[in-house]
Amino acid sequence: MDKPLMPKATAVWLIENTALTFDQIANFCAMHPLEVKGIADGEVAVGIMGMNPITSGEISAEELKLAERDPNYQIKLLESAKRQFQLKKNSRYTPVARRQDKPDAISWFLKNYPTATDAQITKLIGTTKTTINSIKTRSHWNIQNIKPKDPVLLGLCSQTELDNLTSKLKIEEPEELKK
């Protein structure tokens, strides 16, 4: 289901600035109608600034007017917004505080799964092939301080993502993970 980038902020704006029904807003924002009612009553989303879905390019003004006239009409996200949000969903942001942990995770992965390709490690941990190669060749600028650490424990990937990759590699779990 497609929904706005910031559903609660969009719902706040729609409640304050339109004559849409709670069901229409709930359907568009992928929320429960009671949650939308709670926003209208001031019990939910207190302090959240409303975000105009027209200026953010999520819906057109014509679409909004059409929905206000017909209470059964379901608002649809613009195609350009769908593509934009799909691109944003695929990119992974690593906080600055966690970036220093990536070499440790790469080292752990190279130690425990030596048959993994650079592309697989890059996708899982969110690093570059240059960093992987510098750790493989022990030419990384901070190599003396790199200690192999599980990327799941470092918060760089989920256990499910790691399990999916390791099952593709058809390798048994390392001994330290079995304990």
Image (cartoon, rainbow, N blue to C red):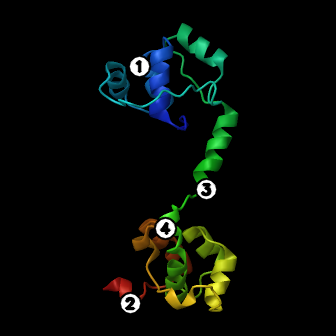
Residue 117 shown left or right of residue 29 in the figure: right
Mark 2 nearby-residue class (10 Å; few <14, some 14–19, many ≥20): few
- Rendered view: 38 above or below 119: above
Q: Nearer the viewer, mark 2 or mark 3?
A: 3
Calculate the distance from the C-alpha at mark 2 to the C-alpha at mark 4. Answer: 26 Å
Q: Quadrant of residue 38?
A: top left
> Which mark identifies residue 98?
4
Q: Cα distance, mark 4 to mark 3?
A: 16 Å
Q: What is the three-letter code of the residue carrying label 2? A: Glu
Image quarter of the C terminus: bottom left
Q: Residue at x 51, y 61 (%)?
A: 95
Label 1 CA crowd tier, 10 Å (few <14, some 14–19, many 20+): many
Q: In terms of sequence position, does the residue under pointer 4 or pointer 3 come before the other? A: 3
Residue pointed to by mark 1: 22
Secondary structure state at the residue bearing disc 4: helix
Disc 3 marks a residue whose amino acid type is: Ser
Which mark sits nearer the N-terminus, 2 or 3? 3
> 77 and 54: which one is in front?
54
Tell whether label 3 touches label 2 (CB within 8 Å).
Answer: no
In this view, the residue in front, 73 or 11, is 11
**C-alpha separation, residue under disc 2 versus residue under disc 3:** 32 Å
Helix, strand or loop at label 2? It is helix
For the residues bearing labels 1 and 4, Cβ distance under 8 angstroms: no
Mark 1 vs mark 3, foreground winner is 3
The numbered dot on residue 79 is none
Which callout, 1 or 4, points at the residue further toward the start of the chain?
1
11 w.r.t. 111: above or below: above
Question: Residue farthest to the top?
Answer: 69
The residue identified by callout 3 is: 91
Q: In the rendered image, which residue does mark 2 sit on?
A: 175
